[in-house]
Image: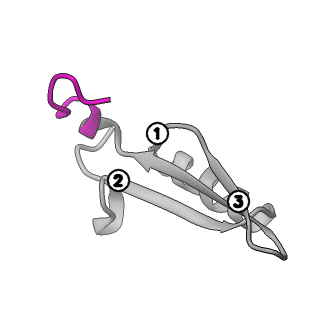
Amino acid sequence: MAASPPNGLPIYRLLTGQDDAVFCRRVSDAIAQGYLLYGSPAATFNGQNVIVAQALIWPSALARRPLGAG
């Protein structure tokens, strides 16, 4: 596994969007690149659609977390 994400991407990403196949593919693509899910997904309703969010982190960032960070 590379020490840094590909293509200059950040080590932490928060993907958001409408809860649909496009969003699921975006999360799946990030996992395929090497990102790990970070925390639980979140969902809300904007009056028309369910909007979801999923945080992802690059594995090497987990080793750099300070003690007590969660």
Where 62 falls versus 56 (above or below)? above
Q: Which residue is mark 3?
A: 44
- Which residue is at the front of the view, 40 or 61? 40
Disc 3 marks a residue whose amino acid type is Thr
Judge whether residue 68 is colored magenta.
Answer: yes
Name the amino acid type tagged 2: Tyr
Could you say where residue 34 lies in the image, as x and y percent from the top left?
45, 44
Q: Secondary structure at mark 2?
A: strand
- Say whether disc 2 or disc 1 marks the residue closer to the N-terminus: 2
**Residue visible at 22% across and 29% down?**
63
Residue at position x 16%, y 23% from top? 67
Q: Residues within 10 Å of mark 1 (few under 14, many from 20)?
A: some
Nearer to us in this view, 50 or 2: 50
Instruction: Report how far apart the C-alphas of labels 2 and 1 lie in the structure.
Output: 9 Å
Figure check: 54 above or below 62 = below
Dot placed on the residue nearer the N-terminal end, 1 or 3: 1
Is disc 2 in contact with disc 1, using a CB cutoff of under 8 Å? yes
List x then y, in percent, for residue 32. Answer: 55, 47
Residue bounds of the magenta highlight: 61-70
Query: Which corner quadrant holds the C terminus?
Result: top left
Q: Which residue is mark 1?
A: 38
Q: Which residue is mark 2?
A: 12
Residue at the image point whose x is 26% and y is 37% from the top: 60
